[in-house]
Image: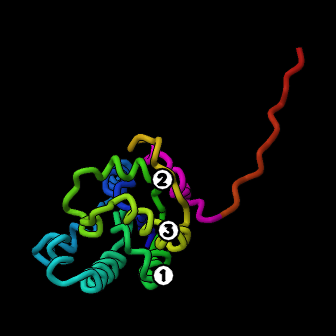
Amino acid sequence: MNNIYLVGFMGTGKTSVGEGLAKKMKRNFIDLDDLIELKERRRICDIFAQEGEPYFRRSEHEALKEVAREKDFIVACGGGIVVNRDNIKIMKETGRIICLRASLPVILKRIRGASHRPLLNVKDQQEQIKCLLKMRAPFYASADRSIDTSRLSIDEVISRVSRLTGEKKNKPGRGNRKPAPKRKAKVKKI
């Protein structure tokens, strides 16, 4: 289906990169968390508070299945979507998974003051992030490619993702034939 799924921890740039990438590649963009909020008619933090994380993860899985039926989408996924191996399977079957990473200090700086992140509504955010990163690391490692966004601008990350996922298009009428062998240029002697 050629979807591009952006995964990674919160604060790594999935939404910003996804929006810019969709514009550059002339594709549709969707943030899975936004879709869940639209369907549930409430914010993610309210879903966590009222129903708990297991309910949210089921909603996330259903939203992913729905989006995976689409073609050529750029999808910004929630940070914990990879913990469900069925989600990884769905993404791999319908596109490519690009993991955006960042160092702990960069993540802390980027998410500072964000009260809408339910998993970080704890006393020691740094320790919570360390714990979540360690727990999710093997799942993030299943991505097709990974990019560290710590020292890159959004435009630089977009360019890298675009290069990593660029599709080679055949010229009309050529099908999948092998290209003609290169000919050596004739050198004219003077």
Instruction: List the single residue furthest toward the top.
Output: 190
Q: Give the labeled residue for mark 2.
A: 161
Q: Is residue 176 left or right of residue 172?
A: right
Query: How far across and how far down the image is residue 55, in percent?
Result: 25, 85
**Which comes sooner in the sequence, label 3 or label 2?**
3
**Circles 3 and 1: CB atoms closer than 8 Å:** no
- Classify the position of the N terminus by image quarter: bottom left
Residue at horizontal 37 percent and vertical 65 percent from the top: 128
Q: What is the quadrant of residue 141 in the picture?
A: bottom right
Q: Give the labeled residue for mark 1.
A: 89
Amino acid type shown at disc 2: Val
Q: CA distance from mark 1 to mark 2?
A: 21 Å
Determine whether 184 is above or below 138 in the image: above
User: Which region shows up in magenta?
Assistant: 156-176
Instruction: List the single residue furthest toward the front.
Output: 123
Q: Pick the residue in front: 71 or 78.
A: 78
Task: Work out whether residue 173 can be spotted.
Answer: yes
Q: CA distance from mark 3 to mark 2?
A: 24 Å
**Circles 3 and 2: CB atoms closer than 8 Å:** no
Amino acid type shown at disc 1: Lys
Q: What is the quadrant of residue 28 in the picture?
A: bottom left
**Which comes sooner in the sequence, label 3 or label 1?**
1
Query: How far across and how far down the image is residue 131, in percent?
Result: 44, 68
**Circles 1 and 2: CB atoms closer than 8 Å:** no
Q: Give the labeled residue for mark 3.
A: 134
- Classify the position of the C terminus by image quarter: top right
Q: Is residue 163 left or right of residue 86?
A: right
Task: Work out whether residue 162 can be spotted.
Answer: no
Amino acid type shown at disc 3: Lys
